[in-house]
Image (tube, grey):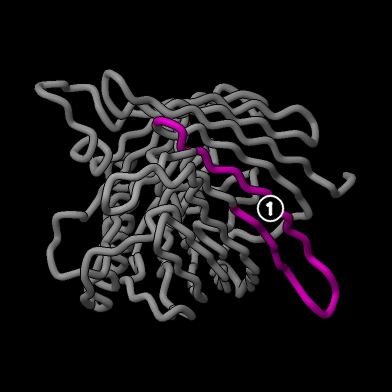
Amino acid sequence: MIFINYLYDKLKYIFQQVFLFISILFCFNSYSQEQNLRFLEIHDDARINALGGNNISSYNKNPYFFLNPSFIGEKKISVNYLKYILDINSSSILYSDSINYIGKFGVGIKYFSHGKFKGFDNQGNYTGEFSPKEYLINFGKSYKFLNISIGTNIKFFNSKLYDESYSGFLFDFGMNYIPDKINNLTLALVLSNYGFLLTNNHTDLPSNIKVGLTFKPEYMPLRFSFTFYQPQKKNFISQNVSLGIEILFSKYFNILVGYNHKNNKSFKLNTEKLRGVSYGLELTLKRINLNYSRLILNSISNSNNISVSYNLKKN
């Protein structure tokens, strides 16, 4: 009976915390139209993609603060590569550190390539090959107050497609919160890609809000994550939910499984049932962390992702 009461109190507290964060989400509900600049929302961290692609609440040994700047902390460097669909590739390098008088900060660069295309004018004459490219330069900063961590990103981006180019500045705000009563529960909130364009060409920015939680049941070798994604636009078709499960074998090796509902809808072919599912492996060897993930988009399109990080701080 004592155990049942204890379990009831724990579950009640978790639902109270989750309800609070969902309420915050709807308070920020604003509007815009469909956008370009999709590369800003395609991430190339293997661990994040293995857990559904939008995970903002599970601690990542790889310092991928593009997604949630509140996790900036340890002195690390990481390299990521994503082989997406067709000839689309993404790669990034990130560095985080903590220095006196500056605090915790991170810098990162992301490069996104669409491959090569043949160009033609309005009369159908061949004009040569072109290679659409996009890149992002990011500076992040984080602060910690008791059991709450907050962070911000300042990002400059440039996107050059065939006959259109965009550049501008974007800002992110992220936070994660670990309640006093439940140390194995993490709640997170991120506001991403709010900013302005520097070019005359107009396009809507992919501004969005994400709410997430990660919870590890006591005495179970599993960690569960849930993320809700709300784009800032009038129609709600692009709302997204992602789920992630970490199977914790040891501090050296874990198996990761995820599901992304938007990928399930976007890459549908005929009557296929297995879409939007991802899986991966995480291996930690002393100061090196290695992640691999594979995303099943449909029967003909899959993506592969690898991330390597190195802890520069000697124990």
Q: Is residue 315 visible?
A: yes
Q: Residue at x 66, y 30 (%)?
A: 290
For residue 54, side relative to residue 64 (left or right): left
Q: Main secondary structure of the magenta part?
A: strand
Residue labelled with disc 1: 94
Image spot of residue 191 (x, y percent): 40, 70
Image spot of residue 295 (x, y percent): 39, 29
Q: Nearer the viewer, residue 90 or 253?
A: 90
Q: Nearer the viewer, residue 300 or 165?
A: 165
With respect to residue 199, does 295 lie above or below?
above
Q: Nearer the viewer, residue 58 or 5?
A: 58
For residue 238, side relative to residue 138 (left or right): left
**Element under label 1?**
strand
With respect to residue 264, does 106 lie above or below?
below
Image spot of residue 61 (x, y percent): 64, 43
Q: Nearer the viewer, residue 48 or 198?
A: 198
Q: Is residue 217 visible?
A: no
Q: What's the amino acid at mark 1?
A: Leu
Q: Residues within 10 Å of mark 1 (few under 14, many from 20)?
A: many
Q: Residue at x 53, y 36 (%)?
A: 82
Is residue 34 on the magenta stretch?
no
Q: Residue 218: name its quadrant.
A: top left
Q: Residue at x 68, y 53 (%)?
A: 94
User: Which residue occupies the extreme left position in the image?
Assistant: 271
Image quarter of the N terminus:
top left
User: Which residue occupies the extreme top position in the image?
Assistant: 299
Image spot of residue 192 (x, y percent): 42, 67
Image quarter of the C terminus:
top right
Mark count:
1
Q: Residue at x 56, y 22 (%)?
A: 249
* Boundaries of the magenta span: 86-110
